Image (cartoon, grey):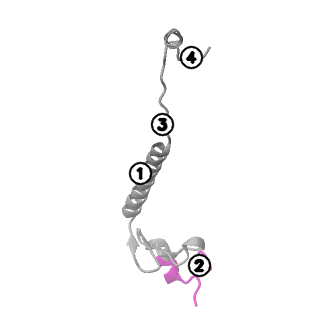
Amino acid sequence: MVECWHCKAESPTEHYDRVVHNRCALHGPWKGWRLAGRDLVSPTGVRMSPQRLEGLAWRLELEQRREARKMAARIREGKKRVRVVVVDLDDYRHQGIAAA
């Protein structure tokens, strides 16, 4: 195998594909995924453009906001409501309701 004169780790063909066509495998939690040109390619072969990824991230953010609003509404509905009545103290005493 002939090594690349630049990185000494891959063949010239592999180096050309990585640099010119942006074809490279990803590592860590992205293992199995790869970059191919402008697209991110899943292990099953699904290609995603940067615009599609941006759209999916935007949609997920909006869905999370909607769920947070729904949860807040459920919490508000679940609270017991308290009714406050304001009564003038003199009227209250004159009616004989207070035991003073």
Q: Nearer the viewer, mark 4 or mark 1?
A: 4
Residue that badge 3 annotates = 81
The residue carrying pointer 3 sits among few (fewer than 14), some (14 to 19) or many (20 or more) residues within 10 Å by Cα, namely few
x 48%, y 77%: residue: 16
Q: Earlier in the sequence, mark 3 or mark 1?
A: 1
User: Disc 2 on helix, strand or loop?
Assistant: loop
Circle 2/circle 1 CB separation < 8 Å: no
Q: Are marks 4 and 1 in contact (CB under 8 Å)?
A: no
Residue 45 shown left or right of residue 15 in the figure: left
Q: CA distance from mark 2 to mark 3?
A: 76 Å
> Residue 9: within the magenta?
yes
Q: If the image is split into quadrants, where does the C terminus sit?
A: top right
Give the camera-side residue of 10 and 66. 66
Mark 4: secondary structure:
loop
Q: Which residues are magenta?
A: 1-17
Mark toward the viewer: 3 or 1: 3
Q: Regarding mark 3 in the picture, which secondary structure is present there?
A: loop
Residue 65 lies in the magenta stretch? no
Residue behind mark 1: 66
Up-down relation of residue 58 to residue 77 (above or below): below
Whether tag 3 and tag 4 are in contact, CB under 8 A, the answer is: no
The amino acid type found where label 2 is placed reads: Trp
Q: According to the image, label 4 marks what residue?
A: 98
Report which residue position mark 2 lands on: 5
Q: Which mark is residue 29?
A: none
Residue 51, percent from left and from top: 37, 61
Q: Residue at x 45, y 48 (%)?
A: 74
